[in-house]
Amino acid sequence: MTKSDLIKQKKAAAEKAVEFIESGMLVGLGTGSTVKFMIEGLAKKIKNGLDVKTVSTSNATSNFAESLGITVLNFNDVEEIDITIDGADEVDPNLNGIKGGGGALLNEKIVASSSKKNIWMVDSTKHVELLGRFPLPVEVVPFGINQTLNKLFLLGYKPEFRSAAGKNYVTDGNHYIIDLHLNKIKNPAELNNKLLLIPGVVDTGLFLEVCDVLIISADDECKIILKT
């Protein structure tokens, strides 16, 4: 798939996701390239009269949304979110996914857990039969980071520090991210539980039973899959 085709699919999925937003809603904004297209579409609808407020999963998303005139509330000041719209790095047929490629997995999971409905939008390359081709992000605390890395190495997970500008990538919560190169994840729930038992691990990029509506853009149309 060419880069222009990929962008076209991302935009189409984002435009379809915006259709789920109604006036009066409190909307959770995810993080990532597809989310940016969705935010642009939302800003246009707000200028045309749509009345919504939002909360955000990252500083980057907040800054972008506010630059387009979208009201972003402090997440600590809200109780429940009507819908959260986000992307995903991979989604399997059971609507389980890997997220965190944008570095905001912990915030994304917290916001998703407070949402009545979670909508994911992906291009066709992200819909897979088996999770794992995309490296699984694991958010970890800096203290004892080398020991945490070694534990993941000994378990055979092929861990690698995520870097940015030659340094360890730092999340909005001042944590690090270690990406696991697993290739295939046959039992996501078992792996998730095993990782969470490792001291130093804050959370994983495995989002299980979170997605309620999946929008897949492919071949000039969007397919919508609902959680059963």
Image (cartoon, rainbow, N blue to C red):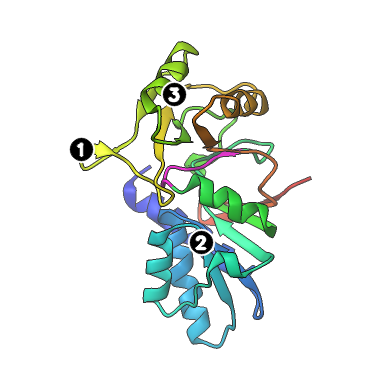
Q: In this view, does 79 lie above or below 13?
A: below
Task: Report the amino acid beneath label 2.
Answer: Ala
- Pinpoint residue 216: horizontal percent, then vertical percent: 57, 50
* Residue at 41%, 74% in the rendered image: 66
- The answer to whether residue 59 of the structure is visible from this angle is yes
Residue farthest toward the right in the current orientation of the protein: 228
**Residue that carries the numbered disc 1 in the rendered image:** 166
Say what secondary structure mark 1 lies in: loop
Q: Helix, strand or loop at disc 3?
A: helix
- Residue 217 seen by the camera: no
Q: What stretch is highlighted in magenta?
A: 97-103
| Quadrant placement of the N terminus | top left
Q: Does residue 190 lie above or below 13 as drawn?
A: above
Mark nearest the camera among 1 and 2 is: 1
Residue for point 47% across, 43% down: 100
Where disc 2 sits, the SS reads helix
List the residue tagged with mark 2: 14
Front residue of this view, candidates 50 and 69: 69
Q: Check if residue 78 falls in the magenta segment.
A: no
Instruction: Say which mark, if any, is on residue 148.
Output: 3
Identified by mark 1, the residue type is Gly
User: Image point 55% across, 71% down: which residue?
Assistant: 54
